[in-house]
Structures are given as structure tokens and as C-alpha cells.
Image: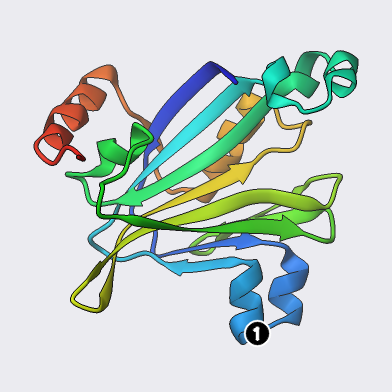
Amino acid sequence: MKELRNEMYRAVHPNRITFGDPYYFESFTGDKLRSLTLDLKVPDWMDVCIVLREDLMEREDYGDDDLFARLSGDELKRRALVIYLAPAKTMQTYLDGMQYESQKVDEKQIGVDTACYLLGVDNRIETVQTAADGYWGCVETLYRNIEGKTCHDAVIITVEMPEDYDFEAMKALAGRCFEEMRSVTKTEKGKNRRDASRDAPR
């Protein structure tokens, strides 16, 4: 994929984030619900960073050359809202797509059966019509096992956008979900990178 656009934002610390098919939240409980959706209480020690991505899918991203040949315009664009939750001093590591050698990753796909998903941040809940069932995001939990205990380091939540959501519609969705969302300047990005370098991954 070729990156077309990437914008980073900060927001007020959320207490709870939910993501998944509304039908699942209404119909299931316990382990079944947890296996299908995300309902995360965000620890106070985690910062939040929201990244809006727009990528151009290229031929090598498709296993079917005939399918690629039939696509054009927005059909070739992938847009995703990515929520990074991590301590401030290590946030840049995850924003750079890296992790620490001692960490493990637990990945859970978020799918839908009713062609829609909800994205909730505290009491702000948005429902997105996807026009198709299937997987519309994933949750990656990065953790370490220390003396028999599981220590969570970061959570990365990827929310895929349907084709009819252009970049501005995705940004508007994020703005409705997150309180006081503001753009991160180049200076702030540079500061984050210098801070993270002290804890660089191996």
C-alpha cells in the first residue's frame, strides 16, 4: 500500500471505548460478547493518540489480478481510524509500527453480521453503515509476561471505513467520538520522537 494521507490528533483521555456490531452488544453477554467485540476501560496511565490514514491499494495487495483490474478511484483507497493507547514515553514506538522484543501481541478481529458497527467513546456513540458483513477492524493488545503476571503495555484499535466515507467524513466521525480532538503539530511529533528514543525497542 502507498500512503496518501496521515493525520495525527490528541483528545481528552477516554474512560471507555466500545467497538463492534450493535446486534452483538444487544444479544450476547460474557465470554461470547468479549470474543466478538471490544469494551475497554482505558487505564489512567494510558495516553490516547488518534491517527487517520488513507492508503492506496496496489496490485501486490490483491491476490486476484482480475479483481484489481476492475477497481478504480475510491475503490482502491483504504481509510482507517487508528486509536493508539499507550504511556506517553513509549507512544512513538507504536506510532512507528514497532514493538519491544519482550512483548507479545494478542490480535482480535472485529466483525459484523448486520452490515454496521458502533464506535463508542464514553457516552458518545456513533453507528456506521458498512454495506457489507465481514471484518471491519481489529484490536491489538501488546503485553509482557513478568514473573507469571500479564502486564499490558499498549492497545491499538483499527477501525476500517466503508467506501462511502471519504477522509473528511472519517475525520468528522472521529471528532464526534473524541472530546476536544486537536491536530498534533510537527513540533509535537518531533518532541514525541525524542522522548521515545530513550526507551527505543531492541
193 above or below 50?
Answer: above
x and y, in percent, of residue 72 in the image = 83, 14
x and y, in percent, of residue 4 in the image = 56, 15
- Quarter of the figure that contains the N terminus: top right
Circle 1 crowding by C-alpha within 10 Å: few under 14, some 14–19, many from 20: few
64 above or below 200?
Answer: above
Please report the residue visible at 33 percent of the width from the left and 40 percent of the height from the top.
Answer: 94
Please report the residue visible at 84 percent of the width from the left and 60 percent of the height from the top.
Answer: 114
Mark 1, residue position: 29
Left or right of 95 in this view: 100: left
Looking at the image, the residue that sits furthest to the bottom is 30
Q: Quadrant of residue 168?
A: top right
Left or right of 181 in this view: 164: right
x and y, in percent, of residue 66 in the image = 90, 19
16 above or below 109?
Answer: below
Q: Secondary structure at mark 1?
A: loop
x and y, in percent, of residue 158 in the image = 54, 45
116 above or below 6?
Answer: below
Please report the residue visible at 52 percent of the width from the left and 55 percent of the height from the top.
Answer: 139
Q: Count the marks.
A: 1
Residue 194 appearing in the image: yes
Residue 125 appearing in the image: no
Q: Quadrant of residue 102?
A: bottom left
Query: Who is closer to the viewer here, 157 or 171?
Result: 157
- Quarter of the figure that contains the C terminus: top left
Please report the residue visible at 22 percent of the width from the left and 60 percent of the height from the top.
Answer: 45
Left or right of 100 in this view: 37: right
Q: Quadrant of residue 26?
A: bottom right
Q: Amino acid at mark 1?
A: Thr
